[in-house]
Image (cartoon, rainbow, N blue to C red):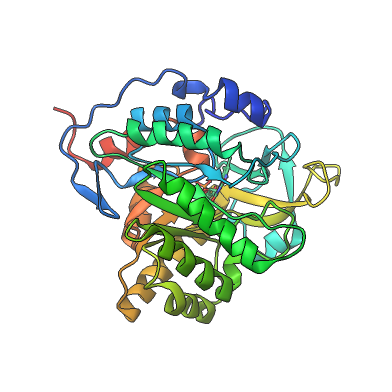
């Protein structure tokens, strides 16, 4: 189902931030759940283990609209310890993919297109913008407090690399970000190890020593507050197993997947998103569902094999109740949708009504 999106790709990030959300999120009717919260997500009761992952919910107004619309887990867009600009407009563009975005196809590159239609896949490239700490802390605290019975807001963050390449300072910045997010009262924290849009050739989530070091440092800081790590698609099974052996007992949850990076050109062969370092950007939506499901299934099997307890958050290409079910069957404790929810603000209600007892 394609509705008017709550993030308008034809407007700048700043305009979306100030005037959004749009579509049915502009004035959502408060969704009435039919029963008490029956599920638990990292120690928090939720009506339904479904939500919107880090990214599309730019600020508290977006988070509140998502909660009101029945998305019971709402992740506030990734923040930093200092203000950071957004990449140039446009930041969201549709891509021309009919089937799966295979890893071979992602290597070769893909073509953008003008219209948003099903099966919907897009590329997004923001560069993880952030406002000053004073601005987002107040706004996030307000959004956290808004979550009612059976709902929870997750605070997502990441560290910022300084030009001098000082690794200790980079690790400390992750820890500071975690502390600042925890100060807002957020009951779950998520660290983004997998942003493909910052011009870095190598995603942090593939540097296992860093993932372990930063996860440990963050956990030392935040204590019992649950920590989720946001990961990209791991092709190599041995590497995934090693990662879990290193961090599976340190972190409380693993959210996978983030987008899959690919070179995106327009139909004339020109770079689709303007600016240096932006030929490759993250692809999400229907075309990456196979990868999200595959990661979820492999994480669940390895969790069992290794006798671990971390929660699995399944992400990638969810746009229907059937997709939600497939992720749950693959082993996801919670499921989230970014692209699907952006273009269908009724998605949580549709999933609940299709899978729970009908309304009396
Ligand atoms: C507009 C947009 C912005 C995003 N920004 C972030 C972000 O700031 N941090 C993050 O961890 N993931 C970000 N993501 C990735 C999503 O959380 C998700 O992992 C990815 O889009 C795959 O899910 P989907 O197929 O449902 O879109 C963003 C995705 C979209 C569509």
Along the line of sight, which residue is nearer the eye, 182 or 271?
182
Asked if one can make out residue 1 in the rendered structure from this viewpoint, the answer is no
Quarter of the view holding residue 228? bottom left
Along the line of sight, which residue is nearer the eye, 136 or 345?
136
- Percent across and percent down for residue 303 are 35, 73
In the image, taking residue 69 as reference, residue 218 lies left or right, namely: right
- Residue 128 vs 246, above or below: the answer is above
Q: Residue furthest left?
A: 360
Q: Residue at x 45, y 36 (%)?
A: 140
Quarter of the view holding residue 244? bottom left
Q: Which residue is drawn at 46% across and 69% down?
A: 216
- Percent across and percent down for residue 217 are 48, 66
Q: Which residue lies furthest to the top in this view?
A: 27
Along the line of sight, which residue is nearer the eye, 45 or 103?
45
In the image, taking residue 63 as reference, residue 55 lies left or right, namely: right
Q: Residue at x 63, y 45 (%)?
A: 128
């Amino acid at each position: 189902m394609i509705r008017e999106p709550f993030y308008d790709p034809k407007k700048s990030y700043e305009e979306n931030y100030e005037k959004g959300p749009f579509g049915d999120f502009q004035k959502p009717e408060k969704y009435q759940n039919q029963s008490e919260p029956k599920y638990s997500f990292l120690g928090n009761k939720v009506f339904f283990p479904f939500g919107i992952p880090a990214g599309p919910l730019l600020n508290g107004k977006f988070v509140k609209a998502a909660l009101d619309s029945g998305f019971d887990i709402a992740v506030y867009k990734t923040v930093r310890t200092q203000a950071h600009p957004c990449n140039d407009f446009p930041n969201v563009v549709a891509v021309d993919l009919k089937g799966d975005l295979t890893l071979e196809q992602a290597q070769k590159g893909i073509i953008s297109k003008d219209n948003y239609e099903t099966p919907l896949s897009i590329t997004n490239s923001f560069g993880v913008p952030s406002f000053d700490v004073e601005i987002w802390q107040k706004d996030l605290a307000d959004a956290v407090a808004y979550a009612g019975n059976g709902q929870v807001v997750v605070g997502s963050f990441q560290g910022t690399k300084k030009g001098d390449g000082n690794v200790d300072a980079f690790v400390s910045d992750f820890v500071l970000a975690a502390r600042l997010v925890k100060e807002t009262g957020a009951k779950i924290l998520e660290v983004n190890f997998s942003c493909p849009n910052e011009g870095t050739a190598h995603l942090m989530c593939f540097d296992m020593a860093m993932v372990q070091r930063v996860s440990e440092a963050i956990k030392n800081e935040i204590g019992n507050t649950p920590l989720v790590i946001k990961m990209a698609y791991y092709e190599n099974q041995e590497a995934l197993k090693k990662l879990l052996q290193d961090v599976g007992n340190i972190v409380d949850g693993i959210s996978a997947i983030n987008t899959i990076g690919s070179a995106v050109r327009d139909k004339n062969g020109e770079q689709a998103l303007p600016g240096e370092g932006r030929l490759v950007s993250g692809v999400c939506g229907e075309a990456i569902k196979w990868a999200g499901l595959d990661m979820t299934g492999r994480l669940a099997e390895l969790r069992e094999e290794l006798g671990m307890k971390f929660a699995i958050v399944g992400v990638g290409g969810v746009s229907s109740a059937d997709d939600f079910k497939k992720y749950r069957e693959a082993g996801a404790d919670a499921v989230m949708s970014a692209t699907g929810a952006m273009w269908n603000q009724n998605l949580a209600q549709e999933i609940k009504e299709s899978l729970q007892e009908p309304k009396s």
